[in-house]
Amino acid sequence: MGDGIHEEVLRALVEQQAVRECLVARIDGGPAWGLSIRLGGSGARWVPVRSRRERLRSWASLTAVGRFAESVGLTAFSVEL
């Protein structure tokens, strides 16, 4: 998956029920939030969601991340403060 996963691929993985876990955390301790997913079996690594232009997609608030998650079909995520 390279350095991240694009929204279109994320939608397809959610549709196929391949996403095991979702985690929302601050990016580098700053004010922006990022979303990562974990696929498949044990030992799977976290893969961040990326934008078309940037390595990481970021959101200004948890509410915004929630709206995005809902729009791609995710039903739950954990938040790391």
Image (cartoon, rainbow, N blue to C red):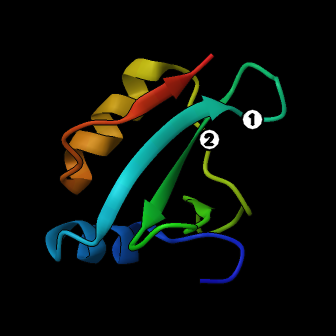
Read off the residue under disc 2.
58
Give the foreground label among 2 and 1. 1
Q: Which residue is pictured at 49% across the width and 71% down the height? A: 6
Residue type at tag 2? Ser
Residue 46, image x and y in percent? Answer: 60, 59
Q: Which residue is pictured at 23% across the width and 48% down the height? A: 74
Residue type at tag 1? Ile
For this rendering, which residue is in front, 29 or 63?
Answer: 29
Determine the secondary structure under disc 2: loop
Picture disc at residue 50: none
2 or 1: tag closer to the N-terminus: 1
- 21 sits left or right of 70 in the view: right
- 43 sits left or right of 70 in the view: right
Q: CA distance from mark 2 to mark 1?
A: 8 Å
For this rendering, which residue is in front, 76 or 43?
Answer: 43
2 up-or-down from 43: above or below: below
Residue 55, image x and y in percent? Answer: 74, 63
Read off the residue under disc 1.
27
Determine the secondary structure under disc 1: loop
Work out which quarter of the rendered image holds the C terminus and state it: top right
Q: Which residue is pictured at 42% across the width and 72% down the height? A: 41
Residue contact at pointers 2 and 1, CB within 8 angstroms: yes
Q: Quadrant of residue 4?
A: bottom right
Q: Which residue is pictured at 42% across the width and 46% down the height? A: 22
For this rendering, which residue is in front, 34 or 80?
Answer: 80
Furthest residue in direction front, as rendered: 42
